[in-house]
Amino acid sequence: MVAIAENVQHRLTIETVEIAPNTTAIRSLDWDRDRFDIEFGLQNGTTYNSYLIRGEQTVLIDTSHQKFRQLYLDTLKSIVNPKTIDYIIVSHTEPDHSGLVEDVLQLAPRATVLASKIALQFLEGLVHDPFSKRAVKSGDRLDIGKGHEIEFVSAPNLHWPDTIFSYDRQTQIIYTCDAFGMHFCDERTFDEDLEAIEADFRFYYDCLMGPNARSLLNAMKRMSELGNIKIIANGHGPLLYHHLDILTGCYQNWSQRQSKAETTAGLFYVSEYGHGDRLVQAIAEGITKTGVGIEILDLSTAEVQEIQELAGRAAGIIIGMPPTTAVAALAGISSILAVVGNKQVVGLFESYGGDDEPVDTLHSKFIALGVKEAFPPIRIKEVPGASTYQLCQEAGTDLGQLLVRERNIKQIKSIDANLEKALGRISSGLYIITTKKGDVSSAMLASWVAQASLQPLGITIAVAKDRAIDSLMRVGDRFVLNVLEEGNYQELKKHFLKRLLPGSDRFAGVKTQTAKNGSPILTDALAYIECEVSSSLECSDHWILYCSVQEGAISNPDAITAVRHRKVGSYY
Ligand code: FEO
Protein backbone atom coordinates (compact mmCIF):
# COMPACT_ATOMS: atom_id res chain seq x y z
CA MET A 1 0.00 0.00 0.00
CA VAL A 2 1.19 3.52 -0.70
CA ALA A 3 2.70 4.73 2.56
CA ILE A 4 0.69 7.61 3.88
CA ALA A 5 1.39 8.91 7.35
CA GLU A 6 -1.65 9.22 9.60
CA ASN A 7 -1.35 12.98 9.87
CA VAL A 8 -0.97 13.74 6.18
CA GLN A 9 -3.21 16.64 5.24
CA HIS A 10 -4.65 16.06 1.82
CA ARG A 11 -5.30 18.99 -0.38
CA LEU A 12 -9.05 19.37 -0.52
CA THR A 13 -10.56 22.35 -2.27
CA ILE A 14 -13.96 23.14 -3.68
CA GLU A 15 -15.09 25.14 -6.68
CA THR A 16 -18.50 26.38 -7.73
CA VAL A 17 -19.10 27.24 -11.37
CA GLU A 18 -22.18 28.38 -13.28
CA ILE A 19 -22.27 25.84 -16.08
CA ALA A 20 -25.61 26.95 -17.58
CA PRO A 21 -28.50 29.28 -16.65
CA ASN A 22 -29.69 28.52 -13.09
CA THR A 23 -27.24 25.64 -12.91
CA THR A 24 -24.22 25.48 -10.62
CA ALA A 25 -21.58 22.76 -10.43
CA ILE A 26 -20.17 22.23 -6.93
CA ARG A 27 -16.96 20.31 -7.51
CA SER A 28 -15.06 18.87 -4.54
CA LEU A 29 -11.44 18.66 -5.67
CA ASP A 30 -9.40 15.88 -4.06
CA TRP A 31 -5.93 16.60 -5.36
CA ASP A 32 -4.01 13.67 -3.92
CA ARG A 33 -4.51 10.02 -4.43
CA ASP A 34 -4.69 8.67 -0.91
CA ARG A 35 -5.25 5.01 -1.52
CA PHE A 36 -4.25 2.36 -3.96
CA ASP A 37 -7.71 1.66 -5.18
CA ILE A 38 -8.28 -0.27 -8.31
CA GLU A 39 -9.62 2.59 -10.35
CA PHE A 40 -7.17 5.03 -8.79
CA GLY A 41 -4.24 3.46 -10.66
CA LEU A 42 -3.28 6.80 -12.11
CA GLN A 43 -2.14 9.54 -9.86
CA ASN A 44 -4.19 12.55 -10.70
CA GLY A 45 -6.54 12.67 -7.73
CA THR A 46 -10.26 12.91 -8.36
CA THR A 47 -13.26 15.17 -7.95
CA TYR A 48 -16.76 14.56 -6.58
CA ASN A 49 -19.26 16.60 -8.56
CA SER A 50 -22.57 17.81 -7.24
CA TYR A 51 -25.02 20.15 -8.99
CA LEU A 52 -27.64 22.68 -8.04
CA ILE A 53 -30.50 23.64 -10.40
CA ARG A 54 -32.68 26.60 -9.47
CA GLY A 55 -36.01 26.76 -11.26
CA GLU A 56 -39.07 27.83 -9.32
CA GLN A 57 -38.11 24.91 -7.20
CA THR A 58 -34.56 23.94 -6.25
CA VAL A 59 -32.89 20.62 -6.95
CA LEU A 60 -29.59 19.32 -5.65
CA ILE A 61 -28.05 16.46 -7.60
CA ASP A 62 -25.73 14.25 -5.52
CA THR A 63 -23.49 15.50 -2.74
CA SER A 64 -19.87 14.70 -1.97
CA HIS A 65 -17.51 12.44 -0.07
CA GLN A 66 -17.53 12.56 3.75
CA LYS A 67 -13.98 13.93 3.74
CA PHE A 68 -15.42 17.17 2.29
CA ARG A 69 -18.18 17.41 4.90
CA GLN A 70 -17.44 20.86 6.35
CA LEU A 71 -16.16 22.35 3.11
CA TYR A 72 -19.11 21.07 1.09
CA LEU A 73 -21.80 22.07 3.57
CA ASP A 74 -20.30 25.56 4.03
CA THR A 75 -20.11 25.99 0.28
CA LEU A 76 -23.67 24.79 -0.22
CA LYS A 77 -24.91 27.20 2.46
CA SER A 78 -23.00 30.05 0.80
CA ILE A 79 -24.80 29.60 -2.50
CA VAL A 80 -28.30 28.57 -1.44
CA ASN A 81 -30.44 28.57 1.64
CA PRO A 82 -30.59 24.78 2.15
CA LYS A 83 -34.09 25.09 3.59
CA THR A 84 -35.25 26.05 0.10
CA ILE A 85 -34.01 22.81 -1.49
CA ASP A 86 -37.09 20.94 -2.70
CA TYR A 87 -35.49 17.83 -4.14
CA ILE A 88 -32.28 15.89 -3.73
CA ILE A 89 -31.62 13.60 -6.66
CA VAL A 90 -29.45 10.67 -5.59
CA SER A 91 -28.04 9.23 -8.80
CA HIS A 92 -26.18 6.41 -7.04
CA THR A 93 -25.68 5.56 -3.38
CA GLU A 94 -21.96 4.81 -3.21
CA PRO A 95 -20.69 7.04 -0.38
CA ASP A 96 -18.42 9.15 -2.59
CA HIS A 97 -21.60 10.77 -3.94
CA SER A 98 -24.19 10.15 -1.23
CA GLY A 99 -21.92 10.43 1.82
CA LEU A 100 -23.42 13.78 2.78
CA VAL A 101 -27.07 13.15 1.92
CA GLU A 102 -27.94 12.69 5.58
CA ASP A 103 -26.21 15.99 6.49
CA VAL A 104 -27.95 17.83 3.68
CA LEU A 105 -31.32 16.38 4.70
CA GLN A 106 -30.82 17.79 8.17
CA LEU A 107 -30.30 21.24 6.64
CA ALA A 108 -33.08 20.76 4.07
CA PRO A 109 -35.86 19.06 6.02
CA ARG A 110 -38.54 19.65 3.40
CA ALA A 111 -36.54 18.09 0.56
CA THR A 112 -37.78 14.96 -1.14
CA VAL A 113 -35.17 12.42 -2.21
CA LEU A 114 -35.61 11.21 -5.79
CA ALA A 115 -33.76 8.03 -6.65
CA SER A 116 -34.24 4.58 -8.13
CA LYS A 117 -36.22 2.10 -6.07
CA ILE A 118 -33.02 0.19 -5.25
CA ALA A 119 -31.16 3.36 -4.31
CA LEU A 120 -33.94 4.27 -1.87
CA GLN A 121 -33.60 0.84 -0.24
CA PHE A 122 -29.84 1.36 0.09
CA LEU A 123 -30.36 4.91 1.42
CA GLU A 124 -32.60 3.70 4.19
CA GLY A 125 -29.54 1.96 5.59
CA LEU A 126 -27.45 5.13 5.31
CA VAL A 127 -29.86 7.78 6.58
CA HIS A 128 -31.03 7.27 10.12
CA ASP A 129 -34.07 9.55 10.34
CA PRO A 130 -37.18 9.13 8.17
CA PHE A 131 -37.13 11.27 5.03
CA SER A 132 -39.49 12.13 2.21
CA LYS A 133 -38.75 10.05 -0.88
CA ARG A 134 -40.01 9.13 -4.32
CA ALA A 135 -38.76 6.38 -6.60
CA VAL A 136 -38.13 7.38 -10.22
CA LYS A 137 -37.45 5.35 -13.36
CA SER A 138 -36.95 5.84 -17.10
CA GLY A 139 -39.45 8.24 -18.58
CA ASP A 140 -40.47 9.87 -15.27
CA ARG A 141 -40.28 13.66 -15.35
CA LEU A 142 -40.03 16.48 -12.84
CA ASP A 143 -40.95 20.04 -13.78
CA ILE A 144 -39.25 22.52 -11.45
CA GLY A 145 -40.28 25.63 -13.38
CA LYS A 146 -38.41 28.21 -15.47
CA GLY A 147 -38.37 25.62 -18.24
CA HIS A 148 -36.32 23.10 -16.28
CA GLU A 149 -38.02 19.81 -16.88
CA ILE A 150 -35.93 16.89 -15.71
CA GLU A 151 -36.34 13.47 -17.28
CA PHE A 152 -34.94 10.40 -15.57
CA VAL A 153 -33.18 7.48 -17.21
CA SER A 154 -32.63 4.16 -15.42
CA ALA A 155 -28.99 3.22 -15.86
CA PRO A 156 -28.52 0.07 -13.76
CA ASN A 157 -25.00 -1.23 -13.09
CA LEU A 158 -23.29 2.08 -13.88
CA HIS A 159 -21.83 1.55 -11.46
CA TRP A 160 -24.24 -0.15 -9.05
CA PRO A 161 -27.74 -1.45 -9.84
CA ASP A 162 -29.13 1.71 -8.29
CA THR A 163 -27.98 4.29 -10.84
CA ILE A 164 -30.15 6.84 -12.63
CA PHE A 165 -29.27 9.64 -15.05
CA SER A 166 -31.18 12.96 -15.02
CA TYR A 167 -31.60 15.09 -18.15
CA ASP A 168 -32.58 18.75 -17.97
CA ARG A 169 -34.40 19.64 -21.22
CA GLN A 170 -33.86 23.37 -20.70
CA THR A 171 -30.07 23.29 -20.49
CA GLN A 172 -29.56 20.00 -22.38
CA ILE A 173 -27.33 18.80 -19.58
CA ILE A 174 -27.39 15.16 -18.54
CA TYR A 175 -26.22 14.23 -15.04
CA THR A 176 -24.62 10.78 -15.15
CA CYS A 177 -22.74 10.31 -11.85
CA ASP A 178 -20.06 7.60 -12.34
CA ALA A 179 -20.70 7.08 -16.05
CA PHE A 180 -18.48 9.17 -18.36
CA GLY A 181 -16.33 10.15 -15.39
CA MET A 182 -12.64 9.93 -14.72
CA HIS A 183 -10.35 10.25 -11.74
CA PHE A 184 -8.66 13.46 -12.74
CA CYS A 185 -8.38 16.54 -10.58
CA ASP A 186 -7.88 19.88 -12.24
CA GLU A 187 -9.14 23.44 -11.79
CA ARG A 188 -10.56 23.31 -15.28
CA THR A 189 -14.26 22.51 -15.05
CA PHE A 190 -14.47 21.07 -18.54
CA ASP A 191 -12.60 18.68 -20.80
CA GLU A 192 -10.75 21.18 -22.98
CA ASP A 193 -7.43 19.34 -22.73
CA LEU A 194 -8.16 15.98 -24.31
CA GLU A 195 -4.55 14.87 -24.22
CA ALA A 196 -4.33 15.48 -20.46
CA ILE A 197 -7.40 13.40 -19.63
CA GLU A 198 -7.58 10.61 -22.19
CA ALA A 199 -5.44 8.07 -20.32
CA ASP A 200 -7.50 8.56 -17.12
CA PHE A 201 -10.76 8.48 -19.05
CA ARG A 202 -9.81 5.14 -20.59
CA PHE A 203 -8.45 3.66 -17.38
CA TYR A 204 -11.61 4.59 -15.50
CA TYR A 205 -13.75 3.08 -18.25
CA ASP A 206 -11.76 -0.18 -18.15
CA CYS A 207 -12.11 -0.46 -14.38
CA LEU A 208 -15.68 0.69 -13.76
CA MET A 209 -17.67 0.71 -16.94
CA GLY A 210 -16.12 -1.96 -19.20
CA PRO A 211 -17.43 -4.81 -17.05
CA ASN A 212 -20.93 -3.43 -17.61
CA ALA A 213 -20.65 -2.77 -21.33
CA ARG A 214 -24.12 -4.09 -22.15
CA SER A 215 -25.75 -1.92 -19.49
CA LEU A 216 -23.80 1.02 -20.82
CA LEU A 217 -24.96 0.46 -24.39
CA ASN A 218 -28.56 0.25 -23.16
CA ALA A 219 -28.17 3.48 -21.20
CA MET A 220 -26.55 5.22 -24.18
CA LYS A 221 -29.45 4.15 -26.38
CA ARG A 222 -31.88 5.71 -23.89
CA MET A 223 -29.71 8.83 -23.79
CA SER A 224 -29.87 9.16 -27.57
CA GLU A 225 -33.67 9.30 -27.35
CA LEU A 226 -33.66 12.27 -24.98
CA GLY A 227 -32.68 14.95 -27.49
CA ASN A 228 -29.54 17.00 -27.91
CA ILE A 229 -26.96 16.70 -25.13
CA LYS A 230 -24.75 19.72 -24.70
CA ILE A 231 -22.94 18.77 -21.49
CA ILE A 232 -22.40 15.51 -19.66
CA ALA A 233 -22.24 16.53 -16.02
CA ASN A 234 -20.53 13.50 -14.54
CA GLY A 235 -19.72 12.66 -10.93
CA HIS A 236 -15.92 12.55 -11.23
CA GLY A 237 -13.43 14.67 -13.12
CA PRO A 238 -13.97 17.37 -15.72
CA LEU A 239 -17.41 17.64 -17.32
CA LEU A 240 -17.69 16.58 -20.96
CA TYR A 241 -18.39 19.50 -23.27
CA HIS A 242 -15.54 20.34 -25.68
CA HIS A 243 -14.90 16.73 -26.67
CA LEU A 244 -18.25 15.23 -25.80
CA ASP A 245 -18.71 13.52 -29.17
CA ILE A 246 -15.21 12.02 -29.19
CA LEU A 247 -15.46 10.77 -25.64
CA THR A 248 -18.97 9.32 -25.95
CA GLY A 249 -17.82 7.75 -29.23
CA CYS A 250 -15.03 6.05 -27.29
CA TYR A 251 -17.56 4.67 -24.80
CA GLN A 252 -19.67 3.37 -27.67
CA ASN A 253 -16.73 1.67 -29.44
CA TRP A 254 -15.17 0.17 -26.32
CA SER A 255 -18.53 -1.12 -25.10
CA GLN A 256 -19.47 -2.61 -28.45
CA ARG A 257 -16.13 -4.41 -28.57
CA GLN A 258 -16.65 -5.71 -25.03
CA SER A 259 -20.20 -6.86 -25.58
CA LYS A 260 -19.23 -8.75 -28.74
CA ALA A 261 -16.63 -10.85 -26.94
CA GLU A 262 -17.04 -14.47 -27.98
CA THR A 263 -16.64 -15.73 -24.44
CA THR A 264 -18.39 -14.30 -21.40
CA ALA A 265 -17.93 -14.68 -17.67
CA GLY A 266 -20.77 -13.95 -15.25
CA LEU A 267 -19.94 -12.28 -11.96
CA PHE A 268 -22.48 -12.42 -9.15
CA TYR A 269 -22.24 -10.55 -5.86
CA VAL A 270 -24.05 -8.21 -3.50
CA SER A 271 -22.97 -4.65 -4.17
CA GLU A 272 -23.87 -3.20 -0.82
CA TYR A 273 -22.06 -5.78 1.25
CA GLY A 274 -18.55 -5.90 2.68
CA HIS A 275 -15.78 -5.07 0.24
CA GLY A 276 -17.50 -6.91 -2.61
CA ASP A 277 -17.60 -3.93 -4.90
CA ARG A 278 -13.85 -3.25 -5.04
CA LEU A 279 -13.04 -6.95 -5.16
CA VAL A 280 -15.41 -7.41 -8.09
CA GLN A 281 -13.81 -4.50 -9.85
CA ALA A 282 -10.37 -6.08 -9.49
CA ILE A 283 -11.52 -9.50 -10.68
CA ALA A 284 -13.43 -7.97 -13.58
CA GLU A 285 -10.41 -5.95 -14.64
CA GLY A 286 -8.28 -9.11 -14.60
CA ILE A 287 -10.82 -10.95 -16.76
CA THR A 288 -11.26 -8.07 -19.19
CA LYS A 289 -7.51 -8.05 -19.90
CA THR A 290 -7.84 -11.48 -21.50
CA GLY A 291 -10.50 -10.35 -23.99
CA VAL A 292 -13.24 -12.29 -22.21
CA GLY A 293 -16.45 -10.30 -21.83
CA ILE A 294 -17.87 -9.90 -18.36
CA GLU A 295 -21.36 -9.31 -17.10
CA ILE A 296 -22.08 -8.42 -13.50
CA LEU A 297 -25.27 -9.04 -11.59
CA ASP A 298 -26.23 -8.04 -8.09
CA LEU A 299 -27.65 -11.14 -6.41
CA SER A 300 -29.85 -9.14 -4.09
CA THR A 301 -31.65 -7.17 -6.79
CA ALA A 302 -31.53 -9.22 -10.02
CA GLU A 303 -34.48 -11.40 -11.00
CA VAL A 304 -33.96 -15.18 -10.71
CA GLN A 305 -34.56 -15.60 -14.48
CA GLU A 306 -31.89 -12.98 -15.20
CA ILE A 307 -29.43 -14.76 -12.90
CA GLN A 308 -30.13 -18.15 -14.47
CA GLU A 309 -29.93 -16.80 -18.01
CA LEU A 310 -26.44 -15.41 -17.38
CA ALA A 311 -25.28 -18.41 -15.33
CA GLY A 312 -26.41 -20.78 -18.05
CA ARG A 313 -24.76 -18.82 -20.87
CA ALA A 314 -21.47 -17.75 -19.24
CA ALA A 315 -18.38 -19.89 -19.71
CA GLY A 316 -17.05 -18.75 -16.33
CA ILE A 317 -18.94 -18.11 -13.09
CA ILE A 318 -17.55 -15.95 -10.30
CA ILE A 319 -19.41 -15.48 -7.05
CA GLY A 320 -18.73 -13.07 -4.20
CA MET A 321 -20.07 -14.63 -1.01
CA PRO A 322 -23.21 -12.84 0.24
CA PRO A 323 -24.13 -12.45 3.90
CA THR A 324 -25.76 -15.49 5.49
CA THR A 325 -28.88 -13.41 6.08
CA ALA A 326 -29.39 -12.31 2.47
CA VAL A 327 -32.33 -14.49 1.54
CA ALA A 328 -32.69 -13.22 -2.03
CA ALA A 329 -28.95 -13.59 -2.74
CA LEU A 330 -28.89 -17.13 -1.36
CA ALA A 331 -31.87 -18.02 -3.51
CA GLY A 332 -29.96 -16.53 -6.46
CA ILE A 333 -27.00 -18.82 -5.75
CA SER A 334 -29.29 -21.87 -5.59
CA SER A 335 -30.66 -20.87 -8.98
CA ILE A 336 -27.10 -20.69 -10.37
CA LEU A 337 -26.34 -24.18 -9.06
CA ALA A 338 -29.44 -25.44 -10.86
CA VAL A 339 -28.16 -24.43 -14.31
CA VAL A 340 -24.35 -24.80 -14.32
CA GLY A 341 -22.57 -27.74 -15.93
CA ASN A 342 -19.22 -29.41 -16.42
CA LYS A 343 -18.16 -27.22 -19.36
CA GLN A 344 -18.01 -24.18 -17.11
CA VAL A 345 -15.37 -22.94 -14.69
CA VAL A 346 -15.93 -21.25 -11.35
CA GLY A 347 -14.11 -18.92 -8.96
CA LEU A 348 -15.36 -17.86 -5.52
CA PHE A 349 -14.29 -15.05 -3.24
CA GLU A 350 -15.18 -13.86 0.24
CA SER A 351 -16.61 -10.37 0.50
CA TYR A 352 -15.14 -9.63 3.95
CA GLY A 353 -18.40 -8.30 5.26
CA GLY A 354 -18.19 -10.02 8.66
CA ASP A 355 -21.03 -12.46 7.98
CA ASP A 356 -20.10 -14.17 4.70
CA GLU A 357 -21.80 -17.36 3.65
CA PRO A 358 -19.08 -20.07 3.96
CA VAL A 359 -17.02 -20.36 0.80
CA ASP A 360 -16.10 -24.05 1.23
CA THR A 361 -19.67 -25.36 1.23
CA LEU A 362 -20.45 -23.61 -2.03
CA HIS A 363 -17.12 -24.60 -3.55
CA SER A 364 -17.85 -28.28 -2.84
CA LYS A 365 -21.27 -27.98 -4.47
CA PHE A 366 -19.79 -26.63 -7.70
CA ILE A 367 -17.06 -29.28 -7.79
CA ALA A 368 -19.69 -31.99 -7.20
CA LEU A 369 -21.53 -30.69 -10.26
CA GLY A 370 -18.38 -31.12 -12.36
CA VAL A 371 -17.68 -27.39 -12.66
CA LYS A 372 -13.92 -26.82 -12.85
CA GLU A 373 -12.10 -24.54 -10.46
CA ALA A 374 -10.56 -21.55 -12.25
CA PHE A 375 -8.75 -20.29 -9.17
CA PRO A 376 -8.73 -21.41 -5.53
CA PRO A 377 -11.37 -19.67 -3.38
CA ILE A 378 -10.14 -16.25 -2.33
CA ARG A 379 -10.24 -16.02 1.43
CA ILE A 380 -9.81 -12.57 2.87
CA LYS A 381 -8.46 -12.38 6.38
CA GLU A 382 -7.95 -8.65 6.76
CA VAL A 383 -9.35 -5.43 5.33
CA PRO A 384 -8.56 -5.64 1.61
CA GLY A 385 -5.61 -3.55 0.50
CA ALA A 386 -3.55 -3.22 -2.64
CA SER A 387 -2.16 -6.76 -2.44
CA THR A 388 -5.68 -8.25 -2.09
CA TYR A 389 -6.80 -6.35 -5.16
CA GLN A 390 -3.73 -7.56 -7.03
CA LEU A 391 -4.55 -11.14 -6.00
CA CYS A 392 -8.13 -10.71 -7.25
CA GLN A 393 -6.98 -9.21 -10.51
CA GLU A 394 -4.55 -12.06 -11.11
CA ALA A 395 -7.25 -14.61 -10.26
CA GLY A 396 -9.53 -12.94 -12.83
CA THR A 397 -6.79 -13.11 -15.43
CA ASP A 398 -6.20 -16.79 -14.67
CA LEU A 399 -9.89 -17.48 -15.20
CA GLY A 400 -9.97 -15.51 -18.45
CA GLN A 401 -6.84 -17.21 -19.80
CA LEU A 402 -8.34 -20.59 -19.04
CA LEU A 403 -11.43 -19.71 -21.04
CA VAL A 404 -9.57 -18.47 -24.13
CA ARG A 405 -6.72 -20.99 -24.14
CA GLU A 406 -8.17 -23.29 -26.79
CA ARG A 407 -9.31 -20.44 -28.99
CA ASN A 408 -5.84 -18.88 -28.87
CA ILE A 409 -4.18 -22.18 -29.81
CA LYS A 410 -6.56 -22.49 -32.77
CA GLN A 411 -5.74 -18.97 -33.91
CA ILE A 412 -1.99 -19.62 -33.74
CA LYS A 413 -2.42 -22.81 -35.75
CA SER A 414 -4.21 -20.88 -38.47
CA ILE A 415 -1.21 -18.61 -39.20
CA ASP A 416 0.54 -19.32 -42.51
CA ALA A 417 3.58 -21.49 -41.76
CA ASN A 418 5.98 -19.54 -43.98
CA LEU A 419 4.88 -16.20 -42.59
CA GLU A 420 5.22 -17.56 -39.08
CA LYS A 421 8.80 -18.69 -39.77
CA ALA A 422 9.75 -15.42 -41.47
CA LEU A 423 8.40 -13.40 -38.54
CA GLY A 424 10.32 -15.67 -36.20
CA ARG A 425 13.58 -14.40 -37.73
CA ILE A 426 13.10 -11.11 -35.92
CA SER A 427 15.48 -11.46 -33.02
CA SER A 428 15.59 -9.59 -29.75
CA GLY A 429 17.31 -9.36 -26.41
CA LEU A 430 16.11 -10.88 -23.14
CA TYR A 431 15.02 -8.71 -20.26
CA ILE A 432 13.07 -8.81 -17.04
CA ILE A 433 10.91 -5.85 -16.12
CA THR A 434 10.48 -5.33 -12.41
CA THR A 435 8.26 -2.86 -10.63
CA LYS A 436 6.93 -1.98 -7.20
CA LYS A 437 4.14 0.39 -6.30
CA GLY A 438 3.28 0.63 -2.64
CA ASP A 439 3.29 -2.94 -1.35
CA VAL A 440 2.46 -4.42 -4.74
CA SER A 441 5.28 -5.70 -6.91
CA SER A 442 5.40 -7.56 -10.18
CA ALA A 443 7.81 -8.76 -12.85
CA MET A 444 7.72 -9.94 -16.44
CA LEU A 445 10.15 -11.62 -18.79
CA ALA A 446 10.28 -9.41 -21.88
CA SER A 447 11.85 -9.69 -25.28
CA TRP A 448 9.92 -7.15 -27.33
CA VAL A 449 12.03 -4.24 -26.13
CA ALA A 450 13.80 -1.68 -28.34
CA GLN A 451 15.50 1.69 -28.02
CA ALA A 452 13.14 4.22 -29.54
CA SER A 453 14.62 7.73 -29.17
CA LEU A 454 17.88 9.56 -28.49
CA GLN A 455 16.77 12.94 -27.23
CA PRO A 456 15.45 12.29 -24.71
CA LEU A 457 16.64 8.72 -24.32
CA GLY A 458 13.67 6.43 -24.63
CA ILE A 459 12.68 2.83 -25.20
CA THR A 460 9.54 0.95 -26.23
CA ILE A 461 8.23 -2.24 -24.69
CA ALA A 462 5.30 -4.36 -25.86
CA VAL A 463 3.26 -5.66 -22.92
CA ALA A 464 0.45 -8.16 -23.50
CA LYS A 465 -2.83 -6.88 -22.06
CA ASP A 466 -3.32 -10.02 -19.99
CA ARG A 467 -0.04 -9.67 -18.11
CA ALA A 468 -0.38 -9.13 -14.38
CA ILE A 469 2.21 -6.36 -14.60
CA ASP A 470 0.00 -4.39 -17.00
CA SER A 471 -1.78 -2.59 -14.15
CA LEU A 472 1.54 -1.34 -12.78
CA MET A 473 2.76 -0.08 -16.16
CA ARG A 474 0.39 2.82 -16.79
CA VAL A 475 1.46 6.28 -17.86
CA GLY A 476 3.52 7.80 -15.03
CA ASP A 477 4.47 4.45 -13.50
CA ARG A 478 8.13 3.63 -12.92
CA PHE A 479 9.98 0.37 -13.31
CA VAL A 480 13.38 -1.20 -13.91
CA LEU A 481 14.44 -2.90 -17.13
CA ASN A 482 16.90 -5.64 -16.15
CA VAL A 483 19.10 -6.79 -19.04
CA LEU A 484 19.97 -10.49 -18.94
CA GLU A 485 23.48 -11.71 -19.69
CA GLU A 486 24.34 -14.15 -22.48
CA GLY A 487 25.36 -17.49 -20.97
CA ASN A 488 24.13 -16.53 -17.53
CA TYR A 489 20.39 -16.09 -17.62
CA GLN A 490 18.76 -19.50 -17.37
CA GLU A 491 18.11 -19.36 -13.63
CA LEU A 492 16.43 -15.97 -13.81
CA LYS A 493 14.50 -16.90 -16.93
CA LYS A 494 13.25 -20.11 -15.37
CA HIS A 495 12.23 -18.34 -12.17
CA PHE A 496 10.27 -15.58 -13.88
CA LEU A 497 8.56 -17.92 -16.33
CA LYS A 498 7.19 -20.08 -13.53
CA ARG A 499 3.41 -19.97 -13.25
CA LEU A 500 2.43 -18.94 -9.73
CA LEU A 501 -0.84 -18.90 -7.85
CA PRO A 502 -2.58 -15.50 -7.81
CA GLY A 503 -1.10 -13.17 -5.22
CA SER A 504 2.22 -15.07 -4.85
CA ASP A 505 5.47 -13.18 -4.28
CA ARG A 506 7.25 -13.07 -7.65
CA PHE A 507 10.56 -12.20 -6.01
CA ALA A 508 10.76 -14.95 -3.38
CA GLY A 509 14.25 -16.53 -3.55
CA VAL A 510 15.69 -13.94 -5.97
CA LYS A 511 18.50 -11.54 -5.04
CA THR A 512 17.40 -7.94 -5.45
CA GLN A 513 18.44 -4.40 -4.62
CA THR A 514 16.20 -1.36 -4.64
CA ALA A 515 16.45 1.19 -7.43
CA LYS A 516 16.04 4.91 -6.77
CA ASN A 517 12.55 4.69 -8.24
CA GLY A 518 11.66 1.98 -5.69
CA SER A 519 11.54 -0.97 -8.11
CA PRO A 520 13.64 -4.09 -7.54
CA ILE A 521 16.93 -4.44 -9.43
CA LEU A 522 17.86 -8.08 -10.09
CA THR A 523 21.36 -8.44 -8.66
CA ASP A 524 22.24 -11.20 -11.15
CA ALA A 525 21.27 -9.23 -14.24
CA LEU A 526 23.91 -7.77 -16.55
CA ALA A 527 22.55 -4.24 -16.44
CA TYR A 528 19.62 -2.26 -15.17
CA ILE A 529 17.87 0.83 -16.46
CA GLU A 530 15.37 2.91 -14.47
CA CYS A 531 12.43 3.95 -16.64
CA GLU A 532 9.11 5.77 -16.54
CA VAL A 533 6.16 5.11 -18.84
CA SER A 534 5.57 8.29 -20.88
CA SER A 535 2.82 7.18 -23.23
CA SER A 536 1.06 4.08 -24.46
CA LEU A 537 -0.40 2.95 -27.72
CA GLU A 538 -3.07 0.27 -27.84
CA CYS A 539 -2.15 -2.39 -30.41
CA SER A 540 -4.71 -5.17 -30.42
CA ASP A 541 -3.65 -7.62 -27.70
CA HIS A 542 -0.63 -5.57 -26.55
CA TRP A 543 0.16 -2.11 -25.26
CA ILE A 544 3.23 -0.48 -26.77
CA LEU A 545 4.76 1.62 -24.02
CA TYR A 546 7.11 4.47 -24.79
CA CYS A 547 9.27 5.03 -21.74
CA SER A 548 11.84 7.62 -20.77
CA VAL A 549 15.00 6.30 -19.14
CA GLN A 550 16.53 7.99 -16.12
CA GLU A 551 19.62 6.10 -15.11
CA GLY A 552 21.27 2.72 -15.20
CA ALA A 553 24.43 0.74 -14.67
CA ILE A 554 26.16 -2.37 -15.89
CA SER A 555 27.64 -5.08 -13.68
CA ASN A 556 30.14 -6.61 -16.15
CA PRO A 557 31.55 -4.45 -18.96
CA ASP A 558 32.85 -7.52 -20.84
CA ALA A 559 29.57 -9.40 -20.95
CA ILE A 560 26.97 -9.15 -23.71
CA THR A 561 23.18 -9.16 -23.75
CA ALA A 562 21.35 -12.48 -23.97
CA VAL A 563 19.79 -12.84 -27.41
CA ARG A 564 16.47 -14.45 -28.18
CA HIS A 565 16.29 -16.38 -31.49
CA ARG A 566 12.94 -17.95 -32.30
CA LYS A 567 11.79 -20.48 -34.85
CA VAL A 568 8.37 -18.89 -35.41
CA GLY A 569 6.83 -15.50 -34.75
CA SER A 570 3.61 -16.73 -33.17
CA TYR A 571 4.95 -16.72 -29.63
CA TYR A 572 7.53 -14.80 -27.64
FE1 FEO B 1 -18.16 7.25 -7.77
FE2 FEO B 1 -19.60 4.24 -7.75
O1 FEO B 1 -19.14 5.87 -7.03
Image: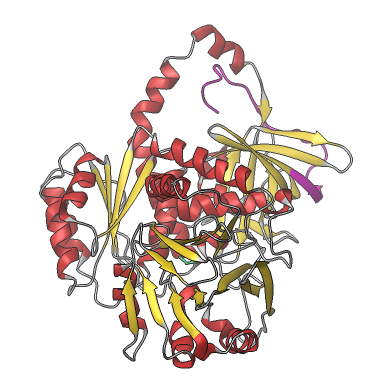
Quarter assignment of residue 240 = bottom right
Query: Is 561 contained in the magenta span?
Result: yes
Residue 550: x and y, percent?
Answer: 81, 51
Q: Is residue 305 left or right of residue 350?
A: left
Q: Main secondary structure of the magenta part?
A: loop
Furthest toward the top, the residue is 418
Q: If the image is split into quadrants, where does the C terminus sit? A: top right
The vertical placement of 487 against 34, above or below, is above
Residue 293: x and y, percent?
Answer: 38, 41
The vertical placement of 119 against 499, above or below, is below
Q: Is residue 157 left or right of residue 245?
A: left
Q: Is residue 383 left or right of residue 552?
A: left
Give the extent of the magenta segment.
547-572
Residue 527: x and y, percent?
Answer: 75, 44
Quarter assignment of residue 557 = top right
Q: Quick one: 75 or 194, which is closer to the camera?
A: 75
Q: Quick one: 505 or 143, which is closer to the camera?
A: 143
Image point (43%, 39%), residue name: 258
Residue 493: x and y, percent?
Answer: 56, 39
Q: If the image is split into quadrants, where does the N terminus sit? A: bottom right
Furthest toward the front, the residue is 146
**Numbered-mark total:** 0
Furthest toward the right, the residue is 455
